[in-house]
Amino acid sequence: MTYTVTAANGVTSQDWIITVVVQPNDQADIESFSLAEEASPATINKLMRTVSIEVEPGTDLSTLIPTIELSQGASCDPGSGRTTDFNNPVEYTITAENGVSFQFWLVNVTSNEAVDIKDNETPTGISIYPNPAREFVHIEFSGKADISLFDITGRVAITFKDVTENVRIPVSELNRGTYLVHLKWIDSQQVFRLLLE
């Protein structure tokens, strides 16, 4: 926009050009996450960048199509409306409108036979100690399960397949911080937090 400024003498004047630039949004959050098969609304934790959502029993987790709302102008990979396999937690990369800022989000989908991510509570029948951990973490449970540790960006740090009842996991070489521990049995799964200090 051009403004003409006239001096007090009424003769001298100058044109000033004012340009307003709107900076692209730098937010990279998941605002809402929904599935047609959901049993209850998703729980979104922006601090930990996690989404937990429960679906109806018997749902095929390998062919779910999420509807995802993001920060204004942001995009995600995998994209909203894309068929996605949620048999394991899925990492989403959210890129802000400015094309520079991005965040990794971890989405965990469970049926109602399983539990959502636990903050300060150990699921019944499972012992995880010590927590916080430094050198090793012990996980005791029933049956045979696959165990994966995900860092806060959603990257897999450690995976054990077909573990029976007890496992001692060395964690001294991992970066300090919060991890998600995913236990998956044939018919259920559980995810909880582990702090490395």
Image (tube, rainbow, N blue to C red):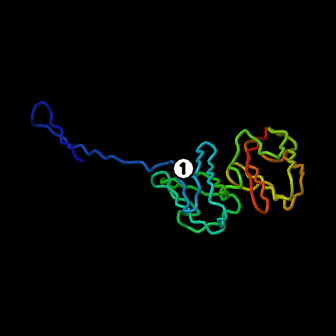
Rendered position, 8 above or below 81: above
- Residue at point 62%, 60% (across, down): 56
Residue 185's image quarter? bottom right
The percent position of residue 127, horizontal first and vertical second, equals 84, 44
The residue depicted at 73 percent of the width and 47 percent of the height is 192
How would you rate the neighbour count of disc 1 (Cα within 10 Å): few for under 14, some for 14-19, many for 20 or more? many
Q: Amino acid at mark 1?
A: Asp
Residue 37's x, y, as percent?
A: 58, 62
Is residue 182 left or right of 59 when viewed as pictured? right
Mark 1 lies on residue = 29
Using the image as rendered, state which of residue 87 and residue 136 is in the foreground. Answer: 87
Assign a secondary structure to mark 1. Answer: loop
Question: Is 149 displayed left or right of 45 in the figure?
Answer: right
> Where residue 114 sits in the image (x, y, percent)?
71, 54
Residue situated furthest top in the rendering: 8
Question: At x 69% / y 48%, what residue is drawn?
Answer: 117
